[in-house]
Amino acid sequence: MRMISLIVALVTTAVLPVLGQEGVGQEIKHDAKKAGETIKDGLETVGDKTKETAKAVGKKTKQAAQTIGEKTRETGETVATKTRETVEGTGEKAETRKPHHKGTKSSNGTEAQPAEEQPKNREANTPAPSPQ
């Protein structure tokens, strides 16, 4: 009987650590599964938030583009109106004014200058050197 008790004691001693390790292994497996689920839930939340943010940014961008388009159109219309008014205003004035001509070409192809501006003696118009 002593022999059987010794064998039972040895088997029990060998089995207990294995059973304990199995419990620890199960606990680790369970904790890892929980951690994986938590990460998965977190990623789904991040994905949902990113999707919502992308939609909001898209809406704001669309609104900004529409506003810019409207402002550009309004500015174009204002410029066109002002240009039309300016052209109409200068068109009336241009009819009452006479064109201004500085000079006419002479028959030999050189530009005619008024008598006052034509130099008689080119050397006389050059400044005298200053004494040093």
Image (cartoon, rainbow, N blue to C red):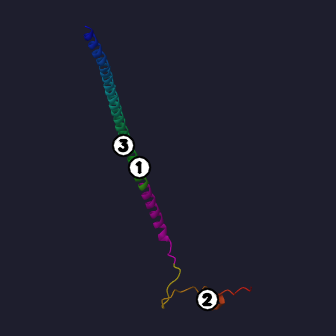
The residue under label 2 is: 119
| Label 2 element class | loop
Crowding at dot 2, Cα within 10 Å, few <14 / some 14-19 / many 20+, comes out as few
Task: Check residue 68 in the rendering and tell me which mark sits there, or answer none.
Answer: 1
Q: CA distance from mark 1 to mark 2?
A: 62 Å
Whether tag 1 and tag 3 are in contact, CB under 8 A, the answer is no
Expressed as whole percent of the image width and height from the top left, the position of residue 91 reads: 45, 67
Residue 122 x, y percent position in the rendering: 62, 90
From which residue to which does the magenta span run? 77-100
Q: Position of residue 7 (x, y in %)?
A: 26, 14
Quick check: 101 left or right of 74?
A: right
Residue positioned 38% across, 38% down in the render: 53
Residue 20 shown left or right of residue 112 in the figure: left
Q: Secondary structure at mark 3?
A: helix
Residue 58, numbered circle:
3
Q: How many marks?
A: 3
- Chief secondary structure of the magenta portion: helix
Kind of residue at badge 2:
Pro
Name the side, left or right, on which 80 lies relative to 5: right
Mark toward the start of the polypeptide (1 vs 2): 1
